Image (tube, grey):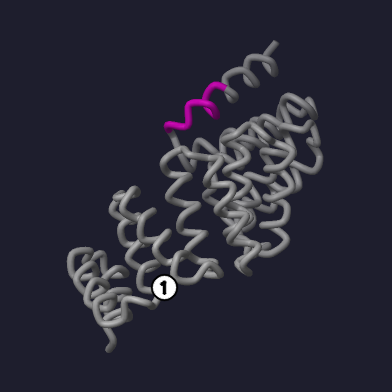
Amino acid sequence: MDKNKLGIQYMQEAKYEEAAKAFSEAIEENPNEPLYYVNFGNLLSAVDELDKAIAFYQKAIGIDETMATAYYGLGNAYYNQSDFKRAQKSFEEATKKGLGNSDTYFMLGMTFLQMEQENKALAHFQRSVELNEEDAEARFQFGLCLAGQSMIDEAIDQFQTVIKLDPTHADAYYNLGVAYAGFKEDGVKALEMFDKALNIQPDHLLAGNGKKIVEEALNQ
């Protein structure tokens, strides 16, 4: 097995020191292969060495400026440093270089959300869901953005799909409860949703508060 593949295997096994050694040896043997720098960057990101990871992604881009995965890794590192403008630019470069998959659009959505640009976030979550209809978390974030834009019926549709994809998604049940209570004025249905959230996550404080408010309203 070559050193790069060995490093990936060690990473998957969470043997990070062994992975670092393997990637270092791969780079020594072929210092002009950008993929090796990307993989080392991914390893450094996994152990929260973000500044070092950024340097490796930038090295990969210096060798091959079309390396889409390097821009994606760079975007993640900047995102985790809360440097959202640089994260946005990096993810957008990843899409331009051919990595226009659901994960990239999801991370762009999260980045715009952090920058309080909900309209742009919504559009990118929508694209993420279009590219991967089975991604419950992208769909959940899409639903939250729809709710934030007062598109409640559309948000409910998304949250209902989320719980079909992931029946343990307590936050989706909670948000359905909010939608039924606050917008549909259906206290019984809201109570059902809050109860399901609490069955999954008994310490879900928001669902607990929602249940209490609805119960008080129904008992008046």
Figure quadrant of residue 18:
bottom left
In screen coordinates, is 83 left or right of 27? right
Placement of the C terminus among the 4 image quadrants: top right
Range of residues picked out in magenta: 203-209
Q: x, y percentage for residue 92?
A: 62, 54
Q: x, y percentage for residue 207?
A: 55, 29
Please rate how many residues cluster around mark 1, counting C-alpha atoms within 10 Å: few if below 14, some from 14 to 19, many from 20: many
Q: Residue at x 24, y 77 (%)?
A: 28
In screen coordinates, is 130 left or right of 100? right
In screen coordinates, is 75 left or right of 43? right
The type of residue carrying mark 1 is Pro
In this rendering, the count of numbered labels is 1
Q: x, y percentage for residue 126?
A: 73, 52
Q: Residue at x 50, y 35 (%)?
A: 198
In screen coordinates, is 153 left or right of 9? right
In the image, residue 124 sits, relative to residue 170, either above or below, namely: below
Q: Based on the picture, tell me whether residue 180 belongs to the magenta stretch.
A: no
Q: Label 1, on which residue? A: 34
Please state which of residues 86 and 152 is positioned toward the viewer in this rendering.
Answer: 86
Name, please, the residue furthest toward the top. 220
Prevailing secondary structure class for the magenta stretch in the rendered image? helix
Name, please, the residue furthest toward the front. 62
Q: Residue at x 72, y 48 (%)?
A: 158
Figure quadrant of residue 176:
top right
